[in-house]
């Protein structure tokens, strides 16, 4: 590039740096293009299924709806986002009352949403939930 005028070299260097910065920002992004929801909770009511599918004293992950529901006593349900608060990954499994994030190992209490093991420190957002005709419905107006 030494044969190019100084102004053109400066422009080319600036373009190369801007491109590299854009790639770096995209690599750190957690938007839906990388498999993460833009909003961690449902924006419209979503039917999850029969309430009796959630074990009493345990929890159930509704992966496609990005919701986890716990049941501490018969008829007492709580719902939380299934999207990790660290990097936006989706929880992959629930064992008893603990949810696991496969990306970095964060674990959450499914009865409270509280982060039990980091790197996540922020609890999972709660999701409104209601029981309609034996079925669980999560999201706004629930």
Image: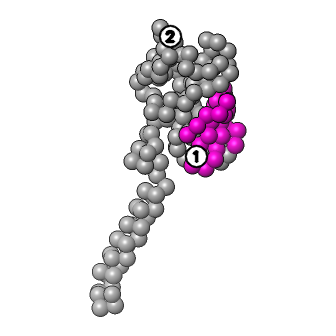
Q: Residues within 10 Å of mark 2 (few under 14, many from 20)?
A: few
* Residue 124 vertical position relative to residue 132 in the rendered view, above or below: below
Q: Earlier in the sequence, mark 2 or mark 1?
A: 1
Q: Residue furthest bottom?
A: 3
Taking the view exactly as shown, the residue that stands out farthest to the top is 133
Q: Please give the name of the residue rendered at 50% of the width and 10% of the height, measured from the top-left corner.
A: 134
Q: Position of residue 114 (x, y in %)?
A: 67, 33
Which residue is denoted by mark 2 in the rendering?
134
Position of residue 65 measured from the top left corner of the image (x, y, whole percent): 46, 30
Magenta stretch holds residue 108? yes
x then y, percent, for residue 56 = 65, 18
What residue does disc 1 label?
Answer: 102
Q: Is residue 123 visible?
A: no
Residues rendered magenta in the picture: 92-117
Q: Residues within 10 Å of mark 1 (few under 14, many from 20)?
A: some
Residue 17 shown left or right of residue 117 in the figure: left
Where is residue 88? Give x, y as percent. 52, 43
96 displayed left or right of 12: right
């Amino acid at each position: 590039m030494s044969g190019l005028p100084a102004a053109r070299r400066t422009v080319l260097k600036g373009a190369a740096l801007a491109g590299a910065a854009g790639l770096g920002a995209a690599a750190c992004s957690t938007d839906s293009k990388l498999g993460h929801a833009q909003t961690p909770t449902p924006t419209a009511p979503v039917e999850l299924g029969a309430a009796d599918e959630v074990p009493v004293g345990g929890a159930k992950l509704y992966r496609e709806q990005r919701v986890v529901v716990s049941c501490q006593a018969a008829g007492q349900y709580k719902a939380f986002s299934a999207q990790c608060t660290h990097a936006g990954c989706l929880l992959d499994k629930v064992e008893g009352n603990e949810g696991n994030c496969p990306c970095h190992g964060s674990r959450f209490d499914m009865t409270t949403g509280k982060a039990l093991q980091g790197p996540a420190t922020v609890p999972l957002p709660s999701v409104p939930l209601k029981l309609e005709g034996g079925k669980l419905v999560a999201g706004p107006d629930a």
